[in-house]
Structure formats: structure tokens, C-alpha cells
Amino acid sequence: MKKKRLTLIHTSPVMIPVFSELCRELLAGIEAVHMVDESLLKDILKNGCLTKPTARRVIQHILSADQAGADAILVTCSSIGKAAEIGRELAESLVMRVDEPMADRAIKLGRRIGVIATIPSTLKPTAELLCRQGSEGLEVFTKLCEGAFEAVISGDLATHDKIVAEGILELAGRVDVIVLAQASMARAADALPSSKATVPILSSPRPAIEYLATVLSAIEKIV
């Protein structure tokens, strides 16, 4: 029987090991294929938002993966989540943005949700996703961890993790649950002592792969 294929579309190669490990753990028997286009995130940072030309390139990547035979496509960068939603309407494959399962979990955990990001282009799309998927009365509090992104791209992981941890602690007293808008922030949350993590802290990679494991298993049974 032919293996099911999951294609992951990244804007940075640093996320490949994170998702490769999760795929090995949770998607045994599924072929994972990685596509990377660093220019997508660079253009978003340059323009301050997801522009139409950049969104079209994301959609082209989705359609290329679809035509190559992917059973599911995961867009792992929240900054290009809106383009993933458009690509979903055009592709035959299942197309998912990485933060959707995380958002579903957060909504079930409380009405006051904190969103933390290190770049503005990720903060707004994640907050909008939560508001769209949540019920009336949902409150979303956002926190931009200024300086963290610059630290991580310069190789200063310790400073990045410190700034993110401070942001988490700042929001923790005001919300029921905190979501990390970028998959790359998960390490900082993991390093936070459990005694200080007074509310659940969710990152997107594991919930996304767990959800896909269920969906792809169902497809296998139908086939």
C-alpha cells in the first residue's frame, strides 16, 4: 500500500528538526516532505504584513505540493496563515495552518486568552484566528516580545528565551491560557519552571501533528 504523504511548508529551515521529530513520533508510516522558502518570511518582515504577492507565492507552494500528490499540507508559519486558508479552497489535499488545532484547544481552556509573539506579523493573525473560532465574550490579550526575534536571529538563544519567558509571566496573571504565536517559541516555554507557569501554555507544533495523525489515520481506514 502506498504511504500517505504530509507536505510541510516552512519559512525557515530551523523548524524542520522540530516537525521531523514530531512526525517520527506521531506519524509512523506517513511520508513527511519538507518545503522551505525563507524569502516568504523575509518579505513579510520587510513589508510588515502578508502582501498579495507573498500570499500568491504561498498559494503556489500549496498547489505544487497538492499536484505532487500530498494527502495533507501543513503550513507551519502563522504569519502566512491567511494564505493557507485561501490555498485550502483551491487544493484537493487537506490544507491546514499550524495554529488551528492550538487555537481550538485554547478556546476550550478559557475565555481569556493571551497571545505572545516575537514579530508583529504573527501576533495579529493568531489573535484574529482565536476571535474567529471562539464564541462571543472571548477576550484576547496580546504581547509582543520586543527584541526576542533580533536576539534569536543573531544566535543569542538565551536572550530570546529570557524575553519570551518574561512576556509569558507578564500575561499569566491576566488570562486563563497562553498561546505562543510562533512554533519557534516553544523552547522558551519548556524552559520555564513549572512553579512559574501558573496557566496552560500552548505551542502549535504538537497539537497540529496530533490532529493530522487522527485525520490521516481516518483517511487510511476509508481507503
Image (spheres, rainbow, N blue to C red):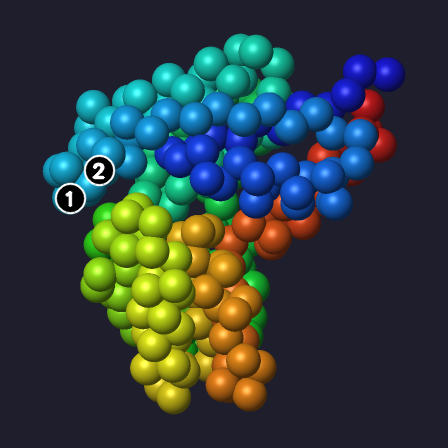
Horizontal relation, residue 103 to residue 141: left or right: right
Q: Left or right of 170: which side holds 88?
A: right
Residue 75 position (above or below residue 153):
above
What percent of the width, then of the height, locates residue 181?
Answer: 39, 57
**Distance between mark 2 and mark 1 Cα atoms:** 6 Å
Q: Is residue 130 visible?
A: no
Residue 147 lies in what quarter of the image? bottom left
The amino acid marked with disc number 2 is Ile
Give the residue at x 27% y 65%. 145
**Do the residues under discs 2 and 1 have CB atoms within 8 angstroms?**
yes
Residue, disc 1:
48
Q: Please, what secondary structure does the residue beneath circle 1 have?
A: loop
For residue 34, above or below residue 104: above
Residue 204 appears at what percent x and percent y?
Answer: 51, 54
Residue 149 x %, y %: 28, 54
Mark 1 is on which residue type?
A: Gly
- Residue highlighted by disc 2: 44
Quarter of the image for residue 11 reads top left
59 in relation to 221, above or below: above
Q: Can residue 15 be seen in the rendering of this structure?
A: yes
Residue at the extreme top: 67
Front one among 30 and 126: 30
Query: Between 23 and 53, which is closer to the camera in this rendering?
Result: 23
Helix, strand or loop under label 2 = helix
- Residue sitting nearer the eye, 60 or 119: 119
Local packing at callout 1 (Cα closer than 10 Å; few below 14, some 14-19, many 20+) is: some
Relative to 28, does residue 165 appear above or below in the rendering? below
